[in-house]
């Protein structure tokens, strides 16, 4: 899997090498561990389980005519338990993003991603997912801005296709500057989860309304 990541990064570099003056490569490597300690009376202080993980990501960003840009990102994550090995998993994410602005008032953002998550000792939970995301933002004036967001994600289970499902999310946000000190943002979201085959599992739908505010105390 790690070799695959390196190959993908090298391919992205080759694709954009002819415009290296506007090319930006960022990334992060991380390694860590966590220990579970019991708080049950007879076992208090004893180690229940332990896992270590490796995490890394690389992003290649290409600046186009300002402020437009696109990027490719690769993420890798591996988790290994000492006892509960059925939680062990290895995940890779591939992400592509293209952002375009018009006259600083309109912005289009397109994002696609692919995830491959493998549970080595719990194969039925292994899956791949595909996501398509489109976002439109419009700055109406100095005080008002709204955003439309649509995301569709499909999950395909490697060894049990009866668990396949997709999730569609529709989101609307309105941001308004009341004055120099107060900013309010109204949000509304509808989400629908649908199973792709007839199973005992239930489809889900829900909606959410939110109010965010930011007040600068002077």
Image: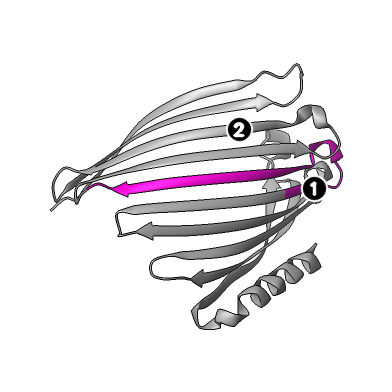
Q: Which residue is mark 1?
A: 118
- Answer with left or right where residue 90 lies relative to residue 31: right
The image quadrant of residue 184 is: top left
Give neighbour class at mark 2: few <14, some 14-19, many 20+ (Cα, 10 Å): some
Residue 139's x, y, as percent? 28, 49
Residues marked 1 and 2 touching at CB (< 8 Å):
no
User: Any magenta on residue 90?
Assistant: no
- Answer with left or right where residue 76 lies relative to residue 181: right
SS category of the residue bearing label 2: strand
At 61% from the left and 62% from the top, the residue drawn is 73
Q: Please determine whether, in this image, residue 213 is positioned above or below residue 73.
A: above
**What is the magenta segment's predominant secondary structure?**
strand
Give neighbour class at mark 1: few <14, some 14-19, many 20+ (Cα, 10 Å): many
- Answer with left or right where residue 67 lies relative to residue 122: left
Q: Please determine whether, in this image, residue 156 is positioned above or below residue 7.
A: above
Which sits in the foreground, 55 or 110?
110
User: Any magenta on residue 125?
Assistant: yes
The image quadrant of residue 171 is: top left
At 46% from the left and 25% from the top, the residue drawn is 207
Residue 172's x, y, as percent? 39, 36
Find the distance from the CA under tag 1 to the CA under tag 2.
Answer: 20 Å
At 16% from the left and 50% from the top, the residue drawn is 217
Residue 39's x, y, as percent? 65, 38
SS category of the residue bearing label 1: strand
Image quarter (top left, top right, bottom left or bottom right) of the N terminus: bottom right
Task: Indicate which disc residue 167 carries.
Answer: 2
State the extent of the magenta-drawn residues as a range.
Answer: 116-140
Which sits in the foreground, 163 or 66?
66
Residue 194's x, y, as percent? 65, 25
């Amino acid at each position: 899997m790690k070799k695959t990541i390196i190959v993908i990064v090298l391919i992205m570099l080759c694709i954009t090498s002819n415009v290296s003056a506007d090319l930006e490569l960022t990334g992060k490597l991380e390694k860590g561990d966590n220990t579970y300690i019991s708080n049950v009376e007879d076992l208090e202080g004893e180690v229940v389980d332990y896992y270590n993980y490796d995490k890394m990501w690389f992003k290649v960003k290409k600046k186009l005519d300002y402020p437009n840009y696109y990027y490719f990102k690769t993420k890798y994550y591996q988790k290994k338990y000492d006892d509960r090995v059925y939680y062990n998993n290895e995940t890779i994410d591939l992400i592509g993003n293209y952002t375009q602005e018009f006259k600083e008032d309109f912005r289009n953002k397109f994002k696609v991603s692919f995830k491959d998550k493998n549970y080595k000792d719990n194969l039925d939970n292994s899956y791949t997912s595909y996501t398509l995301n489109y976002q439109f933002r419009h700055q109406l004036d100095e005080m008002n801005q709204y955003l439309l967001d649509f995301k569709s994600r499909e999950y395909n289970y490697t060894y049990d296709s009866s668990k396949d499902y997709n999730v569609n999310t529709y989101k609307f946000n309105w941001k308004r500057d009341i004055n120099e000190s107060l900013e309010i943002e109204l949000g509304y979201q509808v989400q629908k989860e649908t199973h792709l085959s007839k199973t005992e599992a239930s489809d889900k739908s829900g909606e959410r309304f939110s109010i965010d505010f930011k007040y600068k105390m002077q």
